[in-house]
Image (cartoon, grey):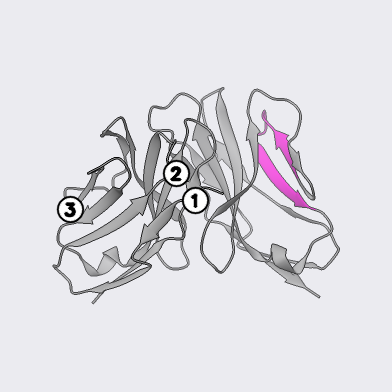
Amino acid sequence: EPEVTQTPSHQVTQMGQEVILRCVPISNHLYFYWYRQILGQKVEFLVSFYNNEISEKSEIFDDQFSVERPDGSNFTLKIRSTKLEDSAMYFCASSEWAGELFFGEGSRLTVL
Amino acid sequence: AQTVTQSQPEMSVQEAETVTLSCTYDTSESDYYLFWYKQPPSRQMILVIRQEAYKQQNATENRFSVNFQKAAKSFSLKISDSQLGDAAMYFCAYRSAWNSGYALNFGKGTSLLVTP
């Protein structure tokens, strides 16, 4: 069964460093998303991406964040200068259109 | 922005019993989708059940069913014959049918404990 895959599963970084989280969405899906979940809290929407551009983003997704689809398969989230409060689980998801989202297993980011 | 409220942070049910998880939402839209996602300790969120707002019939998937009350903006999940494997965090989510981003808005989640 097709699935969304994310790498790395866990990344530890120093405050101020750049981080890139990678995702491979399901191949025939058109919409891609990033969510984050701070430990024990709700799942928060960051950004959605369609047709090679951002279609919606939340207040969390400020200038420190960017997304890219550098080739036909990968979908990346970059955090330019990490802060302590960026420590969270980051989930990538994809969907065909307005139906269900399929989520990856997440990338845990720890900022020291 | 649409808000999703899950008023039960934790619920407990005995194996083989039935439990209902509550969810309410706030929206001015008439067309939307509602979902229940399950997040086991392995972290990945898995779709349990979905409901299209234009459908009056409540969705069912095996032991999982919903009680969708559109006027009351309520979307509860009923789990029948609970199993140990049902223990997880359950998230209610809302998605607009026409928003170009099609993002999901999640509630804060309900942690379900299943006891033998």
Residue at 47% in and 33% down? A96
**Which quarter of the rendered picture does the C terminus of chain B lie within?**
bottom right
Answer yes or no: do the residues labelled 2 and 3 have beta carbons within 8 Å?
no
Instruction: Tell me the CA gap for discs 2 and 3.
Output: 27 Å
In depth, the one of A35 and B9 nearer the eye is A35
Disc 2 residue crowd, few under 14, some 14–19, many 20+, Cα 10 Å: many
Whether the magenta-drawn stretch holds residue B22 is answered as no
- Which residue bears the numbered disc 2? A26
Residue at 76% in and 28% down? B57
Instruction: Tell me the CA gap for discs 3 and 1.
Output: 28 Å
Residue at 49% in and 41% down? B3
Tell me the chief SS of the magenta region.
strand
Q: Amino acid under label 3?
A: Gln
Disc 3 residue crowd, few under 14, some 14–19, many 20+, Cα 10 Å: few
- Which residue bears the numbered disc 1? A3
Instruction: Tell me the CA gap for discs 2 and 1.
Output: 6 Å
Q: Amino acid under label 1?
A: Glu
> Dot 3: what SS?
loop
- Which residue bears the numbered disc 3? A64
In depth, the one of B2 and A45 nearer the eye is A45
Q: Amino acid under label 2?
A: Ile
The chain containing the residue under callout 1 comes to A
Q: Is residue A7 visible?
A: yes
Whether the magenta-drawn stretch holds residue B78 is answered as yes
Q: Position of residue A90 (x, y in %)?
A: 37, 59
Q: Earlier in the sequence, mark 2 or mark 3?
A: 2
Q: From which residue to which does the magenta span run?
A: B65-79
Position above or below: A5 against B115: above
Q: Position of residue A102 (x, y in %)?
A: 50, 46
To which quarter of the image does residue B102 belong?
top left
In depth, the one of A28 and A61 nearer the eye is A28
The chain containing the residue under callout 2 comes to A
